[in-house]
Amino acid sequence: MLAVIAGNVVLWKPSPKAPITSIIIQKICYKAMAKTNVKGVFYLSLLENSEIEPLIAANKQVPLVSFTGSTAVGRKVATSVANRLGRSLLELSGNNASIVCKSADLAQVIPAVVFAAVGTTGQRCTTLRRLYVHADLYSEVLERLLAAYEQLKIGEPWAPETLIGPLIDENSFKNFRQTLKTAVALGGTVHAGAAKVSTQGYFVNPAIVSAEPDWPILQQEAFAPILYIMPFTELTEAIAYQNQSQHGLSSSIFSQSLKE
């Protein structure tokens, strides 16, 4: 969460799950401010959410509040800011999709999809979560994705060979497992994603799930490395599927047709 105070001072509050990272970022900012002689314009707060709300969201001295996070918390921030006729800038959740057309170059598709779906262990708002593949390419794309997933190195994040680190905490791990159980109960097939736990963290195998576009679970942001893959026959159909999501943020299309 960012707050602009008096037009030239910024106060920011990070996720409470990553306090050390935020302190490191703040130190980098201090160095940058010192070089440009603009000290005292960027401050860090590590207060609890309940403490920061009156300081930022409900504070009449704060003309603009920018919040990045879940839709549920975003509603609370928006309501609090609106009650005092302030302004808010919200970036809430992400349910990003990609369309793979029949003309797509799979040499580009596979590495791009893998990175988008499993980078940062699926724990970023721009993670790819829904993949719509032309029916003629569906089997090949799934097969090549599974082969690529088998090569992903899962382990301690500081190891040079590691590509997949842990989920951030136990709740994220439980959510990952429950989401896959729900997908199976709906009739989905989990091609990858058997969970495993390390004594030093919550490590999982990224999952690929054959799904149906109208499942309610596709409207939820698991914030984990779960990629739903679905076939389509007409581009208009795929675009309609993509636009069904209540969440936005990013989208992409793979095609060699300028018209598409």
Image (tube, grey):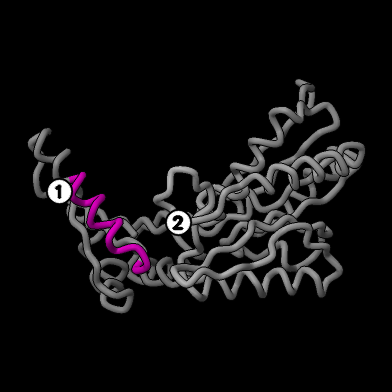
In this picture, is 260 found above or below 226? above
Q: Quadrant of residue 259?
A: top right
In this picture, is 47 found above or below 120? below
- Is 168 a magenta residue? no
Magenta residues (range): 16-29
Which residue is painted at 11% across and 34% down in the image? 35
Residue hosting label 2: 156
Q: Quadrant of the C terminus?
A: top right
Label 1 or label 2, whichever comes before in sequence order: 1
Between 164 and 186, the residue placed more toward the observer is 164
Badge 1 density bin: few <14, some 14–19, many ≥20, Cα 10 Å: some
In this picture, is 218 found above or below 236? below
Between 72 and 23, the residue placed more toward the observer is 23
Q: At which x and y percent is residue 103?
A: 83, 26
Instruction: Say left or right for 241 vs 28.
Output: right
Q: What is the chief secondary structure element of the magenta stretch?
A: helix
Which residue is painted at 47% across and 54% down in the image? 91
Q: At which x and y percent is residue 219?
A: 69, 63
Q: Quadrant of the N terminus?
A: bottom left
Mark 1 lies on a secondary structure that is loop
Q: At which x and y percent is residue 75?
A: 48, 69
| Amino acid under disc 1 | Val
Q: At which x and y percent is residue 55?
A: 23, 70
Mark 2 lies on a secondary structure that is loop
- Mark 1–mark 2 CB contact (< 8 Å): no
Residue hosting label 1: 41
Q: Quadrant of residue 49?
A: bottom left
Which residue is painted at 44% across and 69% down in the image? 200
Badge 2 density bin: few <14, some 14–19, many ≥20, Cα 10 Å: some
Which residue is painted at 10% across and 49% down in the image? 40
In the picture, the disc for residue 3 is none
| Amino acid under disc 2 | Glu
